Image: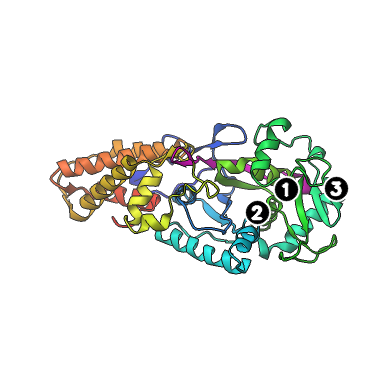
Amino acid sequence: MIHCMMPREFMRGGCGSMALKIFNSFTEKKEVFQSADGRVGIYVCGITPYDVTHLGHAFTYTVFDVVVRYLKHLGYKVTYVQNLTDVDDDILRKAKEEKRVWKDLAEENIEEFLDDMRWLRNSQPDVWPRSTGHIEETIEIVRTLEQKGHAYARNGSVYFDIDSDENYGRLSKLSRKDMLPVANQRGNDPRDPNKKNPLDLVMWQAKKPGEPEWPSQWGEGRPGWHIECSAMSIKHLGQTFDIHGGGRDLIFPHHESSLAQAECATGQKFVRWWMHTGMVHHDGEKMSKSLGNLVLLKDLREKYDPDTIRIYLLSHHYRSSWHVTPGDIAQAVSREKLFRTVWMNSSIAQGDSFDVGHERNGFFDALDDDLNIPLAFDHLESLANRVQKNRGAWTPEARDFMKIAFSILGLGNQR
């Protein structure tokens, strides 16, 4: 059932003329979002802290910040979990290149990331689980998978046998032939002599000289990437939870593999809704650390305020891939100025007739239609322009609605 906490004057027939629909990457269609008890568990894959925050990170986490804010506005009790993958091949590789202690490198980038998220006014997740803090839970899932015949140990490492899961590929919809090149681009080692199948997933990696290690029944080593998220999400949200999110590039192999490992271990449905954000492109390529075409948040912080960057990011639909262009950010600067000017300089005009029903209903209809935040912004801009034409005078209803809208979108300068 959908719970709604909007003031009654802002309701549109209970919780509105539309029920909230979210595109489910698993079914590849929009589905009415429901929770039987009014509670929602959300797990969003967090950063691997081997470098600083770029615009792609900011886009994903700001989108999910609005998802959390809107669900809370509708009356749901939300538990938001965002992990930190604080031990990983990329961290170890970069630490070695820079001749640094891997823990120090990870901690430095985590602190910078958290500071960037605070600057963006992204809500603090309820839980920040770290991979290194869930070694026991990870080992337990690996042990369960081995006992159930879904995993095998060789030379101190343990692998998930993808052939033991006949449904492997159900999220990504990729054939086995198409999986291999994608997996290889994203960290898979097809030449590992211990593997039965080049696509098998390493869940426990035998220790290597100079790398961190923890004890296990298979020998000292460390967890693999995909199994960490299976362990952390189940630990904090249970065997089945509502929303699992992240960038679209995580669908395969990461989310596909986390899903397979979790469901084979528990025998339960892992996630009800999968949500994925589009890719951010710069200089004609997907923005990535490996390509060196990053737009860093720390550089944008020197030029713009948080509201401008939030508006800039949220002016793109969360499922769309988009390119960084000067025109888009100029539009965000203009829109932020309009909102700020209208909000700060306008007065309440008690006697004026000023019906905000069209913009208000349009705003909530847009959010209910798979979080169409760009369209929601258009309705707010329309209202702000009407206020200006009304000689800068608000009605209490218009101002109250705008305050609620700004809160949902996480805009802070106007409130």
Q: Give the colour scheme shown.
A: rainbow
Q: Front-most of 2 and 308?
A: 308
**In the rendered structure, which disc, 1 or 3, sits on the residue that comes first in sequence?**
3
Identify the residue at horizontal 43%, vertical 53% (top origin): 296
- For the residues labelled 2 and 1, the Cα–Cα distance comes to 9 Å
Q: What residue type is labelled 2?
A: Ser
**Label 1 Cα crowd, 10 Å radius (few <14 / some 14-19 / many 20+):** many
Q: Mark 1 points at which residue?
A: 262
Is there a contact, CB below 8 Å, between mark 2 and mark 1? yes
- For the residues labelled 1 and 3, the Cα–Cα distance comes to 12 Å
**In the rendered structure, which disc, 3 or 2, sits on the residue that comes first in sequence?**
3
Q: Give coordinates of residue 305: x percent, y percent.
A: 32, 56
Q: What residue type is labelled 3?
A: Lys
What span is in magenta? Answer: 262-285
- For the residues labelled 3 and 2, the Cα–Cα distance comes to 21 Å
Residue 121 shows in the view: no
Find residue 413 and report its image quarter. bottom left
Q: Which mark is residue 77?
A: none
Vertically, is 95 above or below 234?
Answer: below
Q: Give coordinates of residue 162: x percent, y percent.
A: 78, 40
Secondary structure beneath label 1: helix
Identify the residue at horizontal 57%, vertical 36% (top origin): 24
Secondary structure beneath label 3: loop
Identify the residue at horizontal 58%, vertical 46% (top origin): 243
Q: Mark 2 points at which residue?
A: 233
Q: Which mark is residue 148?
A: 3
**Label 2 Cα crowd, 10 Å radius (few <14 / some 14-19 / many 20+):** many
Q: Give coordinates of residue 409: x percent, y percent.
A: 39, 49
